[in-house]
Image (cartoon, rainbow, N blue to C red):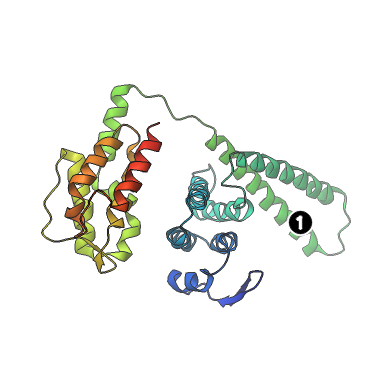
Amino acid sequence: MKQKKDKTESIVFSNDESTEILFEKIKGWKITSQVEFAVSFDSPKRKELFEKIFEAVTNETVKQNISLIVQRIEQAAFQVSGYTHSEIEYYQSLFAKDFYTVLHSENYQTYIEDKIRELLFYCKGLEQDLRTKQYEFLEDREQDKNQLTEAERYKFYLENLFIHLNTPAPQQTETDQEQKTENDFTLSTIEDWLFEFKEKMNETDYQTLVSALKQYFDVGTFPKLLKPIQINGRPNKKLFGWALNRIFEAKGKGVEKELLQFAKQNISLFTDVQFDETNILKSNLYKYFTTQTK
C-alpha cells in the first residue's frame, strides 16, 4: 500500500486498484496534484488516469496543458539502439516523473538539456570516486558502479530523445503527402484515435461508429444508422464532437469546413439530439474550425 498526500488530503491505495477507483479518490484534488499522481504510475495506468483527468477538466487552457504533457510523455517512447522495450518504458516513466511540471511549456527542451548536463557532472563525480575513493565496504563500491551505469544510460536516453525531438520529418512531395493521407485512414488507425470510447460504449455501437467514420473518409458517404449510437447507455451529443476531434488531430488542416458541413448534416445519425442552430456542439465545432484555419 502507498500513501499519496495533497496539502489537505491523503489517500491509501493499491497499484491493483482500477483506474476508476483511483480517480474517484483524487478527483477533488488540485489539477497539479492529480497530474503528479498520474505520473507516479507506469503505462497503461498512467495514460488511463490522464484520460480521466482530461475528461473532468472544463478549463480549455488546462485541457491544452494536459494534452501537451500527455503528448510529450508519449513522444518519449521511441526506440534507442541497445535498449530493450522494457528499458524504454522504464526511462519513459522516469522522464515523466522528472519533467511533468514543465512539459506544457514551450521551452521544455531546455530542461532536458539541463538534466543531461546534471547527469554528466554526476557521472564524472562517480567515476572520480571509483578511481580514488577508499571504500570501507565492497557493497558500497558496487552500489556506486550500479548508480554510474544507471545515470549513464539515462543520460544516453535523454540525449537520444533530444535528437529525436529536433529531427525534422522527411520531406515529401505533394503526391506522397496526398497518398499518405489516404493510406492513413484505415480501420486500425481510426480505432487507435477512438480508443477512449471502448469502455463507454457497447461493442456493437463502437464498431458501428468506427466503420461509419471509416466509410466516410474512404468514399465520402455516410451510412444511415438504424438507431442512435449511445455512450454510457444513452445518446450523447458530445460523442460526435469527440470523434471528429480525434479525426482532426490526424487529418490535419484543409478539411475542417467540409467536416463542419458533414457534422451539421449527420449529427442526428449518431444521436437522437437534434443539431439545431443553438446547439452547443455546433458552436464548439465552429470555434474549433475557425481557430485552426487561421
Element type at mark 1:
helix
- Quadrant position of the C terminus in the picture: top left
Identify the image quadrant of residue 137.
bottom right
* Residue at position x 31%, y 51% in the image: 281
> In this orientation, which residue lies closer to the viewer: 92 or 150?
92
Q: Position of residue 208 (x, y in %)?
A: 18, 56
Residue 207 drawn at (x, y percent): 21, 57
The quarter of the picture where the N terminus appears is: bottom right
- Say left or right for 217 vs 45: left
Q: In this view, does 101 lie above or below 251?
A: below
Q: x and y percent of residue 36 in the render?
A: 59, 61
Count of numbered badges drawn on the protein: 1
Residue 213 visible in this rendered orientation of the protein: yes
Q: Quadrant of residue 31?
A: bottom right
Residue at the extreme top? 173
| Picture coordinates of residue 230, whole percent (x, y) | 23, 63
Question: Which residue is at a point 32% across and 28% down the rendered structure image?
Answer: 177
Q: Residue at x 25, y 35 (%)?
A: 182
Q: What residue type is labelled 1?
A: Asp
Q: In this view, does 210 lie above or below 259?
A: below
- The answer to whether residue 243 of the structure is visible from this angle is no
In this image, 219 relative to 88: left or right?
left
Depth check: give the residue in front, 8 or 186. 8
Q: Which of 142 and 63 is in front in this view?
A: 63
Q: Name the residue under label 1.
A: 144
Q: Residue at x 51, y 68 (%)?
A: 27
